[in-house]
Image (cartoon, grey):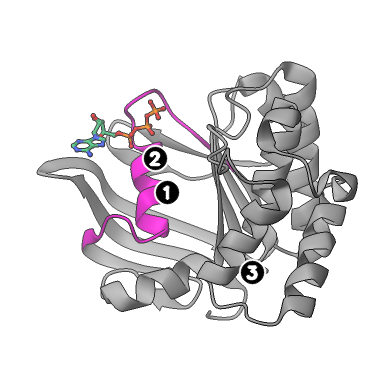
Amino acid sequence: MIGNSIIKLNGADIFQQKHLVLSNVNLHIDKGDFVWLIGQTGSGKSSLLKVLYGDINIASGTGHACGYDLDKIAPKDIPFLRRKLGIVFQDFQLLTDRSVEQNLHFVMQATGWKDKGLINERTLDVLEKVGLRSKLKKMPHELSGGEQQRVVIARALLNDPEIILADEPTGNLDPDTSEEIVMLLKQISQQSNTAVLIATHDYHIIRTFPSRIIKCENGKVLEDVQIA
Ligand SMILES: Nc1ncnc2c1ncn2[C@@H]1O[C@H](COP(=O)(O)OP(=O)(O)OP(=O)(O)O)[C@@H](O)[C@H]1O
């Protein structure tokens, strides 16, 4: 990380296969920033997020995320980059045959946590942050959609990420629950100084939580746009 900078792209070209999706992308996100990412279907929001979590490479230009060089990152380093990112998607992607606790432990074991006491402590800690400490032993199907999304956020917090990347995190939720989820992400950004980048089509929620907006449009990323 350079100073407060968590994400920095300079002149980055982003391809999906042979198709240039976004060109000459310049983007910076600092510690604790709360940023909306908008743009029509197919404009490149998910592609941009994929670059940030090392799923696709940038073809030219430079990029840094959480101290890693995105233009030169070695495949063996990608799991380490991902530990510094909390990833939250629209479809909750919890393991449906495991309890809340087991879902969290699964990720911790996969990311190198060994000490049982610390694992249990951290599990309760992140569930407390999302208001679900009492749901430790529940199975995903015993939770509402909003609660499942909170578990996903808890899971994203396990390794104390520098930034949370959320792709349509409220896409499957009703308006009130959507507001609760965004409120939670906002609190996390304020209390833990974790940056948050949320891709959404939901302008209502953006108006409810006004913040910086970046937009994918016509193959470019526009920084600091306004919505009507
Ligand atoms: N795996 C892929 N292979 C080839 N092209 C792809 C692939 N994934 C996406 N694309 C193309 O890249 C462009 C950008 O897609 P992307 O998913 O980034 O858009 P988006 O803004 O996230 O859309 P949405 O809001 O619908 O999720 C689209 O033209 C899409 O068809």
The image quarter containing residue 88 is top right
The magenta segment is: 36-59
Measuring 75% from the left and 64% from the top, which residue is drawn there? 193
Give the label, 1 or 3, closer to the camera. 3
Q: Amino acid under label 3?
A: Asn
Report helix, strand or loop for mark 2.
helix
Q: Residue 46, labelled with which disc? A: 2
Is 5 on the left-hand or right-hand side of 155? Answer: left
Number of other residues with Cα within 10 Å of mark 1, as a class: few under 14, some 14 to 19, many 20 or more: many
Measuring 87% from the left and 51% from the top, which residue is drawn there? 133
Which residue position holds label 3?
159
The image quarter containing residue 92 is top right
Residue located farthest toward the left when viewing the structure as drawn: 18
Which residue position holds label 1?
49
Residue located farthest toward the front when viewing the structure as drawn: 97
Q: Is mark 2 within 8 Å of ligand 1?
A: yes
Report helix, strand or loop for mark 3.
loop
- Tell me whether the residue at label 1 lies in contact with that at label 2, contact meaning CB atoms closer than 8 angstroms: yes
Q: Is mark 3 within 8 Å of ligand 1?
A: no
- Tell me whether the residue at label 1 lies in contact with that at label 3, contact meaning CB atoms closer than 8 angstroms: no
Query: Which label's residue is closer to the chain start, 1 or 3?
Result: 1
Picture coordinates of residue 47, whole percent (x, y): 33, 44
Of residues 122 and 203, which is closer to you in this image? 122
Number of other residues with Cα within 10 Å of mark 2, as a class: few under 14, some 14 to 19, many 20 or more: some
> Can residue 127 be seen from the camera position used here?
yes
